[in-house]
Image (spheres, coloured by chain):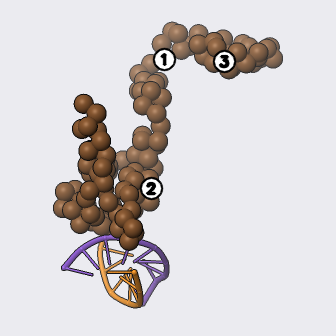
Chain colours: A brown, B purple, C orange
Amino acid sequence: MKEKELRRSMAVFTIGTVMQLTDLTARQIRYYEEQELVHPKRTDTNRRMFSLNDVDRLLEVKDYLAEGLNITAIKRMYSTERKEQEKALEKSQKNLTDEDVRRILYKEILNASGFNSGDSNKPWGRI
DNA sequence: ATTCTCACA
DNA sequence: TGTGAGCA
């Protein structure tokens, strides 16, 4: 199942094809590339070549934009690692777990006492 | 015919 | 984001 990913990532579409596939204007597609939402390869003559993944990404961007999100918000979603994303999401939408509260309190206590060995092996890493 | 970059009555 | 200019 690795051949499939290879093909999804191969750049084979011209901007014209992508325009039809996504209903986006060339201007928008180029702008989203500028915002690093997609990274089409370039041909020897400087033509953009998009992969299936790029098309999917553009379709997602299109939806998020339609849902009222701004480009910068979308940029953060892709630039941030998924794990961090989920954690950030949990903490911003749901409530902090008891473990979270204790961890934060512990950190504050250590900082207040000026004690910080910087043990990155601890679950919470360097405090 | 297409796409590219750049710039803005 | 749209649009037109001047290239490749």
Name the mark nearer the viewer: 2 or 1.
2
**A42 sits left or right of A96 in the view:** left
Q: Which residue appears at 44% of the width and 59% of the height?
A: A34
Image coordinates of residue A99 in percent, x first then y, are 53, 10
N-term mark: 1 or 3: 1
Q: Nearer the viewer, residue A62 or A45?
A: A45
Q: In which quarter of the image is the N terminus of chain A?
A: top left
Q: In whole angstroms, how far apart are the C-alphas of marks 1 and 3?
A: 23 Å
Disc 2, SS: loop
In this rendering, the count of numbered labels is 3
Tag 1 residue: A96
Q: What element carries label 3?
A: loop
What residue is disc 2 on?
A: A35
Is residue A40 depicted above or below A126 in this figure?
below
Task: Tell me if residue A101 comes above or below residue A75 in the rendering.
Answer: above
Locate residue A2: give its quadrant: top left
Whether labels 2 and 1 belong to a single chain: the reply is yes
**Nearer the N terminus, badge 2 or badge 3?**
2
Q: Marks 2/3: CA distance?
A: 34 Å
- Residue A44 point in image, percent of width and height: 39, 67
* Amino acid, disc 1: Leu
Q: Quick one: label 1, few (<14), some, or many (20+) residues within 10 Å?
A: few
Dot 2: chain letter: A
The residue that label 3 is drawn on is A120
- Of the two numbered discs 1 and 3 in the rendering, the one whose residue sits closer to the viewer: 3
Q: Work out whether residue C6 or residue A88 is closer to the camera in this orientation and state it.
A: C6
Q: Looking at the picture, does residue A101 appear above or below residue A20?
A: above
x, y percent for residue A31: 39, 62
Quarter holding the C terminus of chain A? top right
Marks 2 & 3, CB-CB < 8 Å contact:
no
Label at residue A113 = none
Q: Residue at x 40, y 53 (%)?
A: A39
